[in-house]
Image (spheres, rainbow, N blue to C red):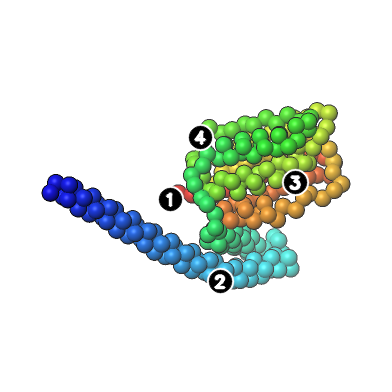
Amino acid sequence: MAALLIAVTAAAILAWREWTWRSAVVSLREERDRTRDELSGVSRLARDLRSPLQGVLGNTELMMAVGDSAAPAAEELRDIHDNAARAADIVRTIAAVADATSLSRRWHDLNDIVARALDSCRAEVPNAGVRVDFERSERLPLVYVDGRQLERALSALLQPPALSRRESGTATLRTRRGEGADDRLVVEFDDRSAPAQVDPLEDLAETRRILAAHGGRLAVDRPLRGGYRFVLELPVWTM
């Protein structure tokens, strides 16, 4: 009798666990589908906002080009243009984030991602002849990103000409909190000793796509006289 009671109890526990697991799976799937629908709606709204904002930017640029820069309304016109440009940038960020449903996001330390990307490049170009000083800010918040994708984007930026072979040289790679109204994290690379390059940079379309999907921005500067610099910015997400 006791054995039968134990068997029935075990079967009941297993059945309850199975039901709980299935209920959790159904709930997660419903939440996933609801999130996808919400992101799709946000993406459509962002795309709808692009056109009127571009219209405001285009018209204000035209008015500033043909108008008198010393006129009393010129300052107000520039202010309208600057605010419209900022709004357009926000809309692009929203659209990119809403479309990035395939990213595997986790909370990461940005310093760790940058360090791994730098180490991978050093392994690929062991005799580059340039020393990279990594200045990491110790008071950065965690970032909610796809660590592997972001590491891949950084590795592409740190490939030659960033670590091009030369007799000697020193470059600086640093992380910091952004300044100004936008709350962003910044990764900067500056190598003033990089030799002048006549060949164009490798296609950074994939790198820019990864950054756009995270709501990031990228500026790359490679003067004709030599040197190489990039500034990568990421938003600080609060969840």
Crowd class of label 1 (few under 14; some 14 to 19; many from 20; radius 10 Å): few
Image location of residue 164, percent across then percent down: 79, 37
Q: Kindly report the distance in space between the C-alpha atoms of the residues bearing marks 1 and 3.
A: 33 Å
Sequence-earlier tag: 3 or 4: 4
Give the number of marks. 4
Q: Name the residue under label 3.
A: 221
Secondary element under disc 1, as helix, strand or loop, is: loop
Sequence-earlier tag: 1 or 3: 3
Image location of residue 219, percent across then percent down: 69, 49
Sequence-earlier tag: 3 or 2: 2
Q: Which residue is located at x 57 percent, y 53 percent? A: 214
Residue 139 bears which disc, if any? 4
Secondary element under disc 4, as helix, strand or loop, is: loop
- Comparing labels 1 and 3, the label whose residue is closer to the camera: 1
Q: Is residue 180 visible?
A: no
Q: Kindly report the distance in space between the C-alpha atoms of the residues bearing marks 4 and 1.
A: 19 Å
